[in-house]
Image (cartoon, helix red, strand yellow):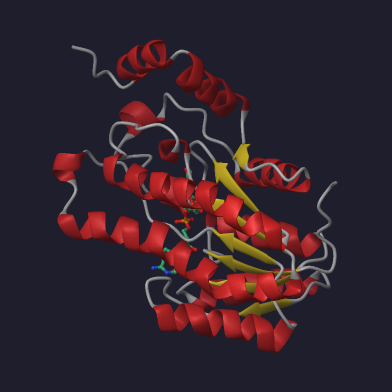
Amino acid sequence: MSYRFDGKRAIVTGASSGIGRGIALRFAELGVKVVLSARRKGELEKVAQEIRVKGGQAVVATADVTSPEDVAAVVQTAVDELGGVDIMANCAGVAGPMTFEETPPERIRQHIEVNYLGAVEFVRNVLPLMKSQESGYIVSISSMSGLKGLPTYVSYGASKFALTGFSDALRHEVKKYGIQMSVAAPPAVHTPMVDDHLESHADWFHKFKIMEVDKVVDRLIAGMSKGRFLILVSTDTKFMYAMVRHFPRAFTRLMMWFYGMEK
Ligand SMILES: NC(=O)c1ccc[n+]([C@@H]2O[C@H](COP(=O)([O-])OP(=O)(O)OC[C@H]3O[C@@H](n4cnc5c(N)ncnc54)[C@H](OP(=O)(O)O)[C@@H]3O)[C@@H](O)[C@H]2O)c1
């Protein structure tokens, strides 16, 4: 059965920028009422305004996902302003290419606290609501590095593996309440997160085909409509993941060559 977006109520984290912003705008076009969350109020207000001029409904709720109090307040805002939560979209994240040796301990902690625990805290808060209404959809933006260990994404990848594993296990527990879960695994996408590193890592970023946010959102919506758990958003990532599963040694050799890391 295909998922219907029209009339649903969503919380979108990371809505001030990049993929989260793109998802929030598309949700609104599909008739979803959205709570936009992130730390930068000004950026969230701009997204809200874009939605409102097109006739959509958007509420701004600033939060740092590492603060349980902030997270609870965002969910309460959704209840107060929209009457509940049908879709929880976990998009907030921090990243940047860095070898493990270059990664300071506080950055490792931040990857886990924002990319993994931040999403978990939102899920913890929305689950009772979704359980009581016997429906809900939780979608989280993981990464290709949350499916296969990739050099220079050691600490980031670990946080995304955690998010993927959490979602994969939890979906079996919540299915009986009518709650669906998806994880999207985008490759490199043109957002401030990647654009900030295009120059400093030009030597290998130029090897990637970098996707546009709109395309990622197209595939995400198509995947959610079909209720797919793992949403691989490009032909390249589908190929890569098929290689990882069926030809893991060949993939590893190819990856080491690609990264210029073969001995
Ligand atoms: N771009 C890619 O190539 C790529 C590939 C695979 C997966 N992803 C994942 O996609 C998601 C979105 O990334 P993006 O590329 O769109 O990056 P982005 O443009 O830098 O957006 C990151 C978002 O996360 C929010 N955020 C960061 N730290 C936060 C915190 N402590 N509390 C609340 N919000 C926080 C930021 O908002 P504020 O600064 O306003 O708080 C911003 O809205 C991330 O989970 C990322 O890991 C990205």
Q: Nearer the viewer, residue 198 or 93?
A: 93
Q: What residue sits 57% from the left and 37% below the top?
A: 211
Q: Is residue 192 above or below residue 82?
A: above
Q: Is residue 146 visible?
A: yes
Left or right placement of residue 225 versus residue 138 in this view: right
Q: Position of residue 209 (x, y in %)?
A: 52, 28
Q: Position of residue 217 (x, y in %)?
A: 67, 47
Q: Camera-side residue: 47 or 157?
A: 157
Up the image or down, 55 lies above or below 30; here it is: below
Residue 113, horizontal then vertical, whole percent: 34, 63
Residue appearing at x 27%, y 18% in the figure: 260
Q: Residue furthest bottom?
A: 80
Is 6 on the left-hand or right-hand side of 26? right
Residue 153 appears left or right of 76: left
The residue located at (49%, 21%) in the rendering is 245
Q: Could you say which quadrant of the image residue 100 lies in?
A: top left
Quarter the C terminus occupies: top left
